[in-house]
Amino acid sequence: MTLNVEYDIKELFDKLENKFVQLENKFDTKFEKLEAKIDKLEDKVDKIGEDVSQLKTDVKVLDQKVEGIGKRFDTQEFINRGVAIGLLVALLGGLAKLFGFDGIH
């Protein structure tokens, strides 16, 4: 029992070529999708970079505001200390007068 199989070589090559074309089309489609995803990622990275730059600028502005508040606080602290000392001197003077210590005899 002998089995003879006959194929036309041209048909085989045509089938192979069709398969290669299909594979190439699938590859091209996948590659285009991948490129689109990469482009989206690049856009997101650029946006993140812009956000980081904005945050750095905001931090600098906040640092300047904190320095200004610190200077105002130091000035206010100096004024409050002067007022407290003046109040203490006046209170001690009033107590001295109340108890008869005039200082002049």
Image (spheres, grey):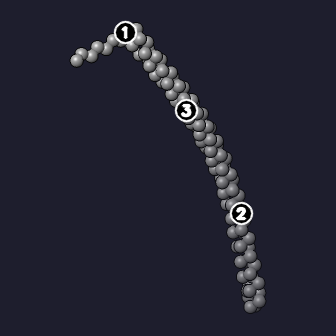
> Going 68% across and 65% down the picture, which residue do you hit?
77
Q: What kind of residue is marked 2?
A: Gln
Give, as a three-letter code, the residue at label 1: Ile
> Decide: marks 1, 3 in contact (CB < 8 A)?
no
Q: Residues within 10 Å of mark 2 (few under 14, many from 20)?
A: few
Q: Secondary structure at mark 3?
A: helix
User: Residue 3's quadrant in the figure?
Assistant: top left
Lower sequence index among marks 3 and 2: 3
Q: Give the mark, 1 or 3, whose residue is nearer the N terminus.
A: 1
Looking at the picture, which amino acid does disc 3 mark?
Answer: Lys
Q: Quadrant of the N terminus?
A: top left
| Residue beneath the point at 62% across and 41% down | 51
Q: Residues within 10 Å of mark 1 (few under 14, many from 20)?
A: few
Query: Residue 18: x percent and y percent?
Result: 46, 16
> Percent from the top left, x then y, of residue 44?
59, 37
Q: Is residue 17 left or right of residue 47?
A: left
Q: CA distance from mark 3 to mark 2?
A: 57 Å
Q: Which residue is mark 3?
A: 37
Q: Is residue 55 visible?
A: yes
Q: What is the quadrant of residue 74 in the picture?
A: bottom right
Q: Residue at x 71, y 77 (%)?
A: 88
Label 1, secondary structure: give it.
Answer: helix
Q: Residue at x 63, y 50 (%)?
A: 63
* Quarter of the rendering containing residue 73: bottom right
Q: Is residue 34 above or below residue 70?
A: above
| Residue for badge 1 | 9
**What residue did someone put label 2 on?**
76
